[in-house]
Amino acid sequence: MNSECHVLGIVLAGGEGKRLMPLTADRAKPAVPFGGTHRLIDFVLSNLVHGGIRRLCVLTQYKSHSLDRHISTTWRLSALTGEYVTPVPAQQRLGPRWYQGSADAIHQSLNLVHDENPEYIAVFGADNIYRMDPRQMLEAHISSGAGVTVAGIRVPRKEATEFGVIRTTDGLMIDAFMEKPADPPGLPDSPEEAYVSMGNYIFTTKVMLEALYADAENAASHHDMGRDIIPALVNSGEAAVYDFNTNVVPGETERDHGYWRDVGTIDSYYDAHTDLISTHPIFNLYNRRWPILAHPGQRAAAKFVEGGSANQSIVSNGCIISGAQVVDSVLSPDVIVEQGAVVQGSVLLDGARVGRGAVVRRAILDKNVVVPAGAHIGVDLARDRGHYHVSEGGIVVLGKGERAI
């Protein structure tokens, strides 16, 4: 990246995340814990910071307290060099109304852009799991001369129907941007693959401002970046696509190159955790050359006593496994699993307690959930459906602070 480029990063973090309920009952989607010690927003912030984009505004709205606190306490950059990560709540600068969509969120926060006066603006989503060097995307954007560049990831055509799909004839400029099409168009060099949008954009500032002003005047608009702003710029011939598969991150493996997962549902959130725990993980959290940054907290190391064991699992600091078995699972800090209990194929968030002789299988336990001695979770789904949230894929979820039956 040209060291003279002035880039402002805007992270869209106001999502409600209804499909992740009950994990989002008390927090914004980007604040949902992930992978033991992280939150979803740590992935995009790590990518931007490692990539040299270090003036970052995080636009928040829905139940944002834990997200705001996490950003304020964890993401402290150097004031000496003018670097910052700042949460920006809805301010109602344009009248007594909340954000109407992601484009409106930026439009209502244009004071941030005017204060920085950047040449380029990186607008990234806050809740996907991936590694990406944004410098390479910025270089491609500058080279193309486009007004906006959209990050696209290749997926099989039959899977693209659930996403915003990009059609390109020459592999560079976008001909059409379609929302969940029944018959997604193939790529010029790979007819059985389609580009879907990752929700990451780089704009030339002047182009973005003009598009936002025009959108604000359009009463028929949803005021959304993906549904309105990008299609408008496609129609004016100003939108290019960036192939995420060409992005190379230091320390990546052949297995996790190009990994990206949208964790918009309970099942995809669960599946993303299973990608972490194999011997050769599909997504490697242990890449020291491009680490996903997080605040480690002041906790003692994990402890295994009375024959307690964990296999094919991630066990965070502060956990105590006492005479229990943990298999194929991810445990966040301060989880306690007591004598004779079995935790299998599960995700346990901070402070969860599993009592003596209890069984937890294919489950997600939110913070401070208590599973009493002898209780069974995920063993009898018919019974569990009468007491807990059970996903389409059969994952049992207990909400924050819930006590199991």
Image: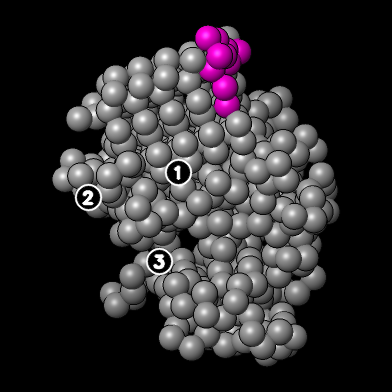
Residue 168 in sight in this render: no
Q: Amino acid at mark 2?
A: Ala
Mark 1 vs mark 2, CA separation in Å? 31 Å
In this rendered view, identify the residue nearer to me: 375 or 77: 375
Q: Amino acid at mark 1?
A: Pro
Q: Amino acid at mark 3?
A: Asp
User: Helix, strand or loop at disc 1?
Assistant: helix
Residue 181: % across, % down:
45, 83
Q: Earlier in the sequence, mark 1 or mark 3?
A: 1
- Residue, disc 1: 30
- Residue, disc 2: 382
Please tell me whether mark 1 or mark 3 is closer to you in this view: 1
How crowded pointer 1 is (Cα within 10 Å; few <14, some 14-19, many 20+) is rated as many
Mark 3 vs mark 2, CA separation in Å? 40 Å
Image position of 159 (left or right of 54): left
Residue depicted at 20% across the width and 44% down the height: 383
User: Helix, strand or loop at disc 2?
Assistant: helix
